[in-house]
Amino acid sequence: TTTRTLPTTDDLRARARAALKRIGVSVPEGTDFAARTPITGDELFGLAAAGPADTEAAIAATREAFLTWRTTPAPRRGELVRRLGELLRDHKSDLADLITIEAGKIRSEALGEVQEMIDICDFAVGLSRQLYGRTIASERPGHRLAETWHPLGVVGVISAFNFPAAVWSWNTAVALACGDTVIWKPSELTPLISLACDRLLDQAAEDVGVPRDVHRLLLGDRAIGEQLVDDARIALVSATGSTRMGREVGPRVAARFGRSLLELGGNNAAVVAPSADLDLAVQGIVFAAAGTAGQRCTTLRRLIVHRDIADTLIARLTAAYAKLPIGDPFDESTLVGPLITTKALDGMQDALTRAQAQGGKILAGGGRRLADAAPRAAYVEPVIVRVDEQTEVVREETFAPVLYVLTYDSLAEAIALHNDVPQGLSSSIFTRDQQEAELFLSAEGSDCGIANVNIGTSGAEIGGAFGGEKETGGGRESGSDAWRAYMRPATNTINYSGRLALAQNVSFL
Ligand code: NAD
């Protein structure tokens, strides 16, 4: 099914302007690049981008602000984050509008993204009264050995289009609580939601009496990102995006001995075992594979199904896919909105052509929708492709709703297939067999940063650490002890014995 009509670009522009106005954003209009909407594929406003001098000024200002922010008591720093969380609550609907307009997310997912920002603010406020170090047993009498966590410096946040606001908040709420200052280079595809987030943080800083320069936003393309990557004053580069981007950023930051936190592409799989509850599995699979039009880093891209249940499961999935409402993401009945650009559509069609050449068979979907109503937009039917083996295209991340289905006979074979891709972000198993579930979660099971049981690969809560292994980059963000990446530990040996005792019984003098 396709939703009947799309809003016009004029409607969307007016809706964006109204949301921005209520949030208090003054849009930096210009001719360097444009804000656009995937709903119609059209431009909304021309914008001014930051140049190298603006980037230099932002680095100097955030570095200067760091010198006082690092000694501001952490619970005081938490007050800034608490105020930000309140403002995000007040503007939840406007922020969700901007996410839908720029990223094409359906209403419920856009609201969910704002909720995720609110949740991480709550988490970071609590964190601001924790940031625990350890006391360690010293081998010497009259000595205390301790570990203290200190702020790191300026954090450069480079983010992707598909979580245009949540990824910023995971980094920024935690970094600010940790005593760091932040420069944000968002995706060039989502400038308006970035302006809104920056404005609310600015307001929060004013409300609680904190210098504005604890945060700076730089709109523009990757050249700004590259300037942050190469500048030794940026203590941590936290970059979210494609593996291609991470491959460039990682070595450049390492070359200057800077730190990087990389959150890159995924190629996530679910194993469906014979004992699985198929009602639950179908729901979990369809959300993970077709939700967000396949544009989450944790989107389910590979289904590894036991041969005995493959035909039944495939029949149920193809029936569910045939009914997915595709179209206007503002329409409450829509479940699948647009792809971000027609370039993403080309990438999907290219992957399908290659998959078929490599022996794959399309079982459901794959067609384009609304091409007449919106020729510059990219609405597609989520697609299921049956493959006999994990060919080259199956091992790549195609950032679109393409689900490859493979079959297995033994769980060992399923786990081997599961892990035999370059990426290592998210994974899941659907089973009612506890031995199978525990094996999948064990050291010889899934090799991913996220491993789930009886739930799909996407839709993580903020309380856990988020990130993945191998070409996903190894970074961890958000909850648990991910905050440690934003601080530097110092080991302290304190001698209160009145005499000098050397470690390892060394004698000297
Ligand atoms: P992208 O790699 O095209 O761009 C991401 C950001 O990096 C943008 O801000 C871009 O301007 C910047 N950039 C690109 N090249 C750069 C360079 N050489 N130096 C500095 N900055 C550079 O990614 P995208 O298309 O916006 O997002 C989709 C990708 O992001 C997918 O691969 C997806 O899996 C991944 N992603 C990963 C996570 C995660 O947490 N692991 C989360 C969201 C998205």
Image (tube, rainbow, N blue to C red):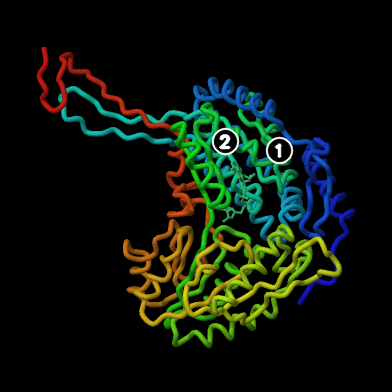
Q: Residue flagged by tag 2: what amino acid is it?
A: Gly
- Give the side of residue 83 with respect to residue 441, left or right: right
What residue is shown with label 2?
A: 156
Residue 209 visible? The answer is no
141 in relation to 385, above or below: above
Q: CA distance from mark 1 to mark 2?
A: 13 Å
Q: Residues within 10 Å of mark 1 (few under 14, many from 20)?
A: many
Residue located 76% across and 48% down the image: 94
8 in relation to 438, above or below: above
Q: The N terminus is located in which quarter?
A: bottom right
Query: Which of these two is toward me, 422 or 136?
Result: 422
- Give the side of residue 34 with respect to residue 59, left or right: right
Q: Residues within 10 Å of mark 2 (few under 14, many from 20)?
A: many
Q: Within 8 Å of ligand 1, the CB of disc 1?
A: no
Residue 231 visible? The answer is yes
Query: Which of these two is toward me, 138 or 14?
Result: 14
Residue located 74% across and 36% down the image: 49
What residue is shown with label 1?
A: 219
Q: Residue 120 location in percent, x, y?
A: 56, 46
